[in-house]
Amino acid sequence: MAIRIALHHKTSYHYDRLVALSPHEVRLRPAPHARTPILSYSLSIKPQQHFINWQQDPYGNYIARLVFPEKSRELEITVDLVADMTVINPFDFFIESYAEIFPFQYTPQLAGELGAYLQAEKPGPLQQAWIKSARQEILKPGLLTIDFLVAVNQRLQKDIGYLVRMEPGVQKPDETLQKASGSCRDSGWLLVQILRNMGLAARFVSGYLIQLTADQKSLDGPSGPEADFTDLHAWAEVYIPGAGWIGLDPTSGMLASEGHIPLACTAMPASAAPVSGATDKAEVEFHHEMSVTRIHEDPRVTKPYSEAEWNAIEALGQQVDADLKKQDVRLTQGGEPTFVSIDDMDGAEWNTLAHGDKNANWRTSSRTA
């Protein structure tokens, strides 16, 4: 089952005068390791007079470097992509045997290659206390690494409340813990530092989050968004030998799946900014819009065929019946409802034997022409 969506993302700056635009770097193209199938992608830039060069940064992320030869009153960046929201099992990976139990040690070669993602800032007192408490609460002999990651991610989600914070930059980990709240980028960076201080390679991720409304309301938990939704988001990834980079979203307490499309994964949050650059001093009007539209949906149990599709199916069935009658094709239909004992449902006569003493009086058959 797949739902095909079209994502539209436009960011525009309108200045009150002609301004010179410095070279800009745009990190709005899905990263090479994105697991959600991207069927098409386009990046449109205004002003029309510009030069664009696609590059990859030191981390392997795609960057569009823009150069503007003339002054302009506007800067507009538009992304359009089409993706298949095929369900992804975030636990679909294997872990090297030496890393299955936490804690473990990276091999010397791997530790060298992951050097930038192992460099932890010196933890403040609140972060030290959180890590100590988490170790006491979570760590047990023989604890599986994946169980440890899930527990840390969920614990942080419970401790840090989510809020929309418009101020630029990322809070210090102790500031986020002291306030017990932060934006997605604040909790994402806090999780990166916690994992690094516990000996794991971790990196900061900026990307798109796509959430589609459920076909049916949940019976025992949150039902999710009331309408299809997309926005820029931030989370963390941790490197586990054998599994590679695993996405952890401390905002939801869940592992990253098909709704998470990474754009930039870096050792430091500043390197993952969606757009970076400068202009002459001027008054500016900023506008930002994002939308997600379903352009194809496979029928499924929770959302079957539409009324028009049902009408087409019934019309086809009527046509088949008419053709069979015209050609004098006669059919028979057989039915065999079978009783299954409530206290011996595993008995052979209810599973493999065609007939038995216990089911002789309960098996009936009918045949009609």
Image (cartoon, grey):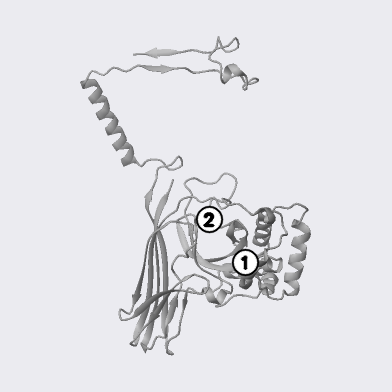
Q: Which residue is mark 2?
A: 257
Q: Is residue 74 above or below residue 243?
A: below
Identify the residue at horizontal 32%, vertical 80% (top origin).
Answer: 47
Instruction: Residue 191: tell me if it is visible.
Output: no
Identify residue type, mark 2: Ser
Question: Badge 1: how crowded within 10 Å, few (<14), some, or many (20+)?
Answer: many
Identify the residue at horizontal 69%, vertical 70% (top origin).
Answer: 177
As drawn, the label of residue 202 is 1
What secondary structure is marked by label 1? strand
Q: Position of residue 116 (x, y in %)?
A: 61, 73
Front: mark 1 or 2: 1
Identify the residue at horizontal 60%, vertical 51% (top origin).
Answer: 94
Q: CA distance from mark 1 to mark 2?
A: 17 Å
Q: Is residue 113 above or below residue 247?
A: below
Q: Quarter holding the C terminus? A: top left
Q: Is residue 211 above or below residue 217?
A: below
Q: How many marks?
A: 2
Q: Position of residue 212 (x, y in %)?
A: 47, 54
Identify the residue at horizontal 55%, vertical 18% (top origin).
Answer: 339
